[in-house]
Amino acid sequence: MSQTSSPADGRFLQDGDHVARILVVKQPDDTYEAQVYVRLTREPEIAETYIPAGIYETEALAWEAAEQRAKRAFEEHEF
C-alpha cells in the first residue's frame, strides 16, 4: 500500500487497483470530520464512494481514523 499527499486534495492511499482519498475537514465547533473516498484507479473522481469516518476532537485523531477506515474499505472491498 502506498501513500501520497496533496494539501488541497487530502492524502491518497493505494492498494492494487483501488485508491482512497482521505480528508479531514474542520467543523464550526472546532472538531474535525474524517472523510474517506474510495474508487478504482481507472475511474474518475466522480465515481468515488464516500465513507464517513467520524468526528474527532483533534486533527491528528481524524487523520488516523480516516487512514484506518480507508484500510478497512480496501480489506472489505467497499467500492
Image (cartoon, grey):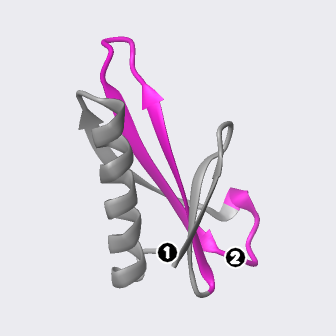
| 12 on left or right of 63 | right
Horizontally, residue 22 falls left or right of residue 40, namely left
**Residue at image point 28% right, 41% down:** 61
Query: Quarter-wise, where is residue 10 in the image?
Result: top right
Give the class, few, some or many, for how many residues have Cα within 10 Å of label 1's Cα (few <14, many ≥20).
some
Over which residues does the magenta segment extend? 17-46
In the image, residue 78 lies at what x, y percent? Answer: 41, 75
Residue at left offset 34%, top offset 82%: 76
- Residue 21, quarter of the rendered image: bottom right
Asked whether 14 or 2 is in front, the reply is 2
Identity, as a three-letter code, of the amino acid under mark 2: Thr
Residue at 28% of width from left, 29% of height from top? Answer: 58
Residue under label 2, please give it: 41
Q: Quadrant of residue 54?
A: top left
Q: Circle 1 sits in a helix, a strand or a loop, which is it? A: loop
Q: Is residue 45 above or below residue 61?
A: below
Q: Nearer the viewer, residue 52 or 6?
A: 6
Distance between mark 2 and mark 1 Cα atoms: 11 Å
**Res 79 label:** 1
Residue 46: x %, y % from top left: 70, 57
